[in-house]
Amino acid sequence: MNFIEARKLVHEYIRRDEEDNVESILTALDQVDLDVKQGEFIAVLGHNGSGKSTLAKHLNVLLTASGGTLWVDGKDTANADNLWAIRQNTGMVFQNPDNQIIASVVEEDVAFGPENIGVPTPEIWKRVEHSLKSVGMIKYREHSPNKLSGGQKQRIAIAGVLAMEPQCIVLDEPTAMLDPNGRREVLEAVEQLNKEKGITVILITHYMEEVIHADRVYVMDNGKVVMQGSPRSLFSQVDTLKSYRLDVPQITLLAYELRKAGLDIPEGILTRQELVEALCQLY
Amino acid sequence: MLRDITIGQYYPVDSVIHRLDPRTKLMAAMLYILSLFVFRGWAGFAAVTLGLVLVIVLSRVPFGYMVRGLKAVVVILVLTVLFNLFLTPGETLAEFWKLRITWEGLKNAGFMAVRLTYLILGSSVLTLTTTPNQLTDGMEKALGPFNRLHIPVHEISMMMSIALRFIPILIEETDKIMKAQLARGADFESGNLIKKAKSMVPLLVPLFISAFRRANDLAMAMEARCYHGGEGRTKMKPLRYKRADIAAYLLSAGYFAGVVALRIIW
């Protein structure tokens, strides 16, 4: 069985009036199938309201399905007994760095997760030090989070999740509120965790540039998974992506336009280097 | 103006005071506040000043940083001084119009000002040298026995520590909303008190909305990190008394006894 397996997952937000009659139903997830293997780097793309955040909240059992099934690490999320085990095993990083830091000192915030799951004190210290080191924030351990930059705060949030020693981290638009530098910091930290520690990463985002390094990409629109595949295969379908209101990275777009204009270069170019090489091959 | 509130703002340096157990500091702060209301006369004044100066020096928090916390209470301070100055009966010192300043009033006003100032400074030492989490840990532990009376001590202390953590964030937010409103022509400065209060409404509404949104996000983030109340929770920094704490207890008890003795003797 895959690490995460969703079959026909449905989630409906039901709005009721005062007499408990259903006023409107918004289907945020519509028959979603998802398969993630241990150690994979998965990106989920979609514009606002596509259901990608709802999907992320299901993986951590912050929401439960209205229909369909979801297994995380072989545990059924519909079973309430599995709740804490799943939450510990799939950590979650949210969009707003300020709203997920609980303590007023960096190291105490990182310790919040392990404290909740009852890790003994000496072990907490070890985990805090280790997690802060892996995101490169160890020298800020005694600082107040208020005085750090957005990228640094997000890395602390990641460290806080790491300290619970999860097998998988779900990041729900972790870079949406950051400047370009902060975005790079956070993505580098995430990629490093995936490569060096083999932690499964599920990155929810609407920035196309961020999915280039993913193993597989899911594109969501209107609650449905509409495209999936490697970044390269996805980016070769520029028109389809555009129809889902997603912006293709500039380099890919340039290569696509050049190809359309008649230049003989391969499909799905992702980086500047690749484009340069492809162009040099021509002459 | 809003940035000047230092209550709940931890000042990260390493000092003897910082390393003390929060329970010790809480107890010492309480004794100090009590002593402020016990002392009388110049000898008592000297004793409480000496105590405060000693603790501030030991805490290694810059004095200027500490004094900033006073700005928030200037109004209360001035009011108290004025009331004491004009409304204390006794030997008349000066008289004009319907107001009368008495010698006792002057003395009372002076000591009241000292009391309030020292009260704020003393409690600032506590909050500047103790992280809010330590502070609430200390309270949680000290109030532990109330758990048996079904008072949710853990939940209350968790709420307090979160409230403290969000003070600077909400202050920053207020500043931002204020600037946004000012940029669109809002006027917070002119007019009488009622008008000023009314002009705060467009400030408070967005602030409350954003605070609720933050609370919602935070609750979700806490749940995602397996928070499920105080049961089965361990601590990264469990509270343990050290030798310095015993010394601090003895010192503050000695100090308090000294102030009481001074009052009785004088």
Image (cartoon, helix red, strand yellow):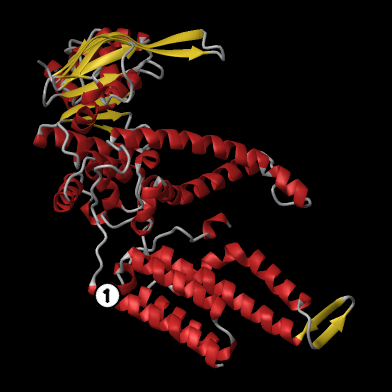
Which residue extends farthest bottom? B266
Residue at x 57%, y 42% (from the top left corner): B177
Up/down of A12 relative to A165, above or below: above
Residue occupied by mark 1: B244
- Pick the residue in front: A189 or A81: A81
- Pick the residue in front: A71 or B22: B22
Where residue A243 appears, x then y in whole percent? 36, 8
Left or right: residue B29 versus residue B14 is right
> Mark 1 belongs to which amino acid?
Ala
Q: Quadrant of residue B92?
A: bottom right
Residue at x 58%, y 36% (from the top left corner): B206
Query: Which image quarter holds the C terminus of chain B?
Result: bottom right
Disc 1 element: helix
Q: Is residue B65 visible?
A: no
Where residue A150 appears, x then y in whole percent? 35, 43
Residue at x 33%, y 33% (from the top left corner): A94
Up/down of B257 relative to A64, above or below: below
- Pick the residue in front: A76 or B71: A76
Residue at x 26%, y 38% (from the top left corner): A186
Query: Which image quarter holds the N terminus of chain B?
Result: bottom right
Which residue extends farthest right? B97
Left or right: residue A84 versus residue B83 is left
Alpha-carbon neighbours of circle 1 within 10 Å: few (<14), some, or many (≥20)? some
Where residue B39 appears, x then y in whole percent? 55, 82
Q: Chain of mark 1?
A: B
Which residue extends farthest front? B149
